[in-house]
Image: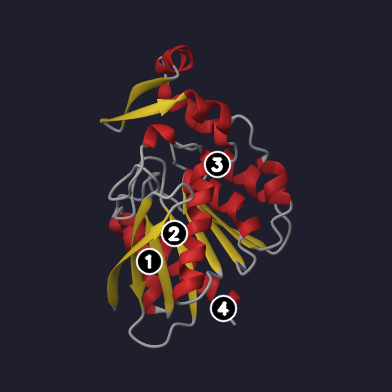
Amino acid sequence: MNNRKAVFEGTHGQELAGRLELPEGDVVATAVFAHCFTCGKDSVAATRIARRLAERGVAVLRFDFTGLGQSGGDFANTTFTSNVDDLVCAAHHLRDTIGAPSVLIGHSLGGTAVLSAAHQIPEARAVVTIGAPFDTSHVEHLFGSSKSRIEAEGVAEVLLAGRPFRISNDFLLDINQQNQTACISGLRRALLVMHSPQDDTVGIENARLVFDSARHPKSFVALDGADHLLTDRADAGYVAEVLAAWVSRYLA
């Protein structure tokens, strides 16, 4: 497989960094992968899933959201809406280079983002969520006692997974203004919901809410025994295999 760097412009002119996994042979379809909240394009899940799909002829663009990884911009200035905008920019980049994405894949909050972005990417035929929260405000609990400081000061530093991130009050306001029920019920794309019953970061009840809000065609796969980040390579490999088999039905 070919693996090459991808650089494209974000909504506000910032440079977004990505990695494009290309098949050895013909490209039968393209996809965008959106990583989990404060993660990056090189996570175990993003890497293994992108490479497995490339083996099936699907070119996959995985990229860092604004202010994360190798992408430019300030994370403190980002919101859920700006993440969705980043996704749309990634789709534009694919459209202008090798072909618009027919598949959108998102992990955790990235899954919530692809559900919102799909409406702005007309070529997308299938959407996949992995451990995604139903409600964007779900991430609020990660901020703990820092939430009141964010609201009072406008921006505050929060420790997430052992790393410091600057979170703005605009981010808090934005995640509480999203209407995911309307987004999901009006998706009009095939949907695959993947979630672990043992996920202690985003509970399995989120998968039920996403699934129940969607119209057919829709599918659910339980990732029994997996953790939220799919840190076990065997779990990430299983997700990649099932996802690749499911999505092949929508890659005519």
> Disc 3 marks which amino acid?
Thr
The disc, 1 or 2, on the residue closer to the chain's N-terminal end is: 2
Tell me residue 235's x, y (percent).
36, 57
Q: For mark 1, what is the residue?
A: 50
Q: For mark 3, what is the residue?
A: 81
Tell me residue 130's x, y (percent).
48, 52
For the rendered model, the colour scheme is secondary structure
Q: Dot 2, crowdedness within 10 Å: few (<14), some or many (≥20)?
A: many
Q: Quadrant of the C terminus?
A: bottom right
> Disc 2 marks which amino acid?
Phe
> Disc 4 marks which amino acid?
Leu
The Cα–Cα distance between marks 4 and 1, rounded to whole angstroms, is 16 Å
Which numbered disc, 3 or 4, marks the residue closer to the eye?
3
| Secondary-structure class at tag 4 | loop
Which numbered disc, 3 or 2, marks the residue closer to the eye?
3
The Cα–Cα distance between marks 4 and 2, rounded to whole angstroms, is 16 Å
Q: Nearer the viewer, residue 144 or 118?
A: 118
Which numbered disc, 1 or 3, marks the residue closer to the eye?
3
Q: Quick check: can you spot residue 131?
A: no
The Cα–Cα distance between marks 1 and 2, rounded to whole angstroms, is 8 Å
Q: Nearer the viewer, residue 233 or 99?
A: 99
Residue located 41% across and 68% down the image: 60
| Secondary-structure class at tag 3 | helix
Whether pointer 4 and pointer 2 mark residues with C-beta atoms closer than 8 Å, the reply is no
Residue located 41% across and 27% down the image: 167
> Disc 1 marks which amino acid?
Ala
Q: For mark 2, what is the residue?
A: 33
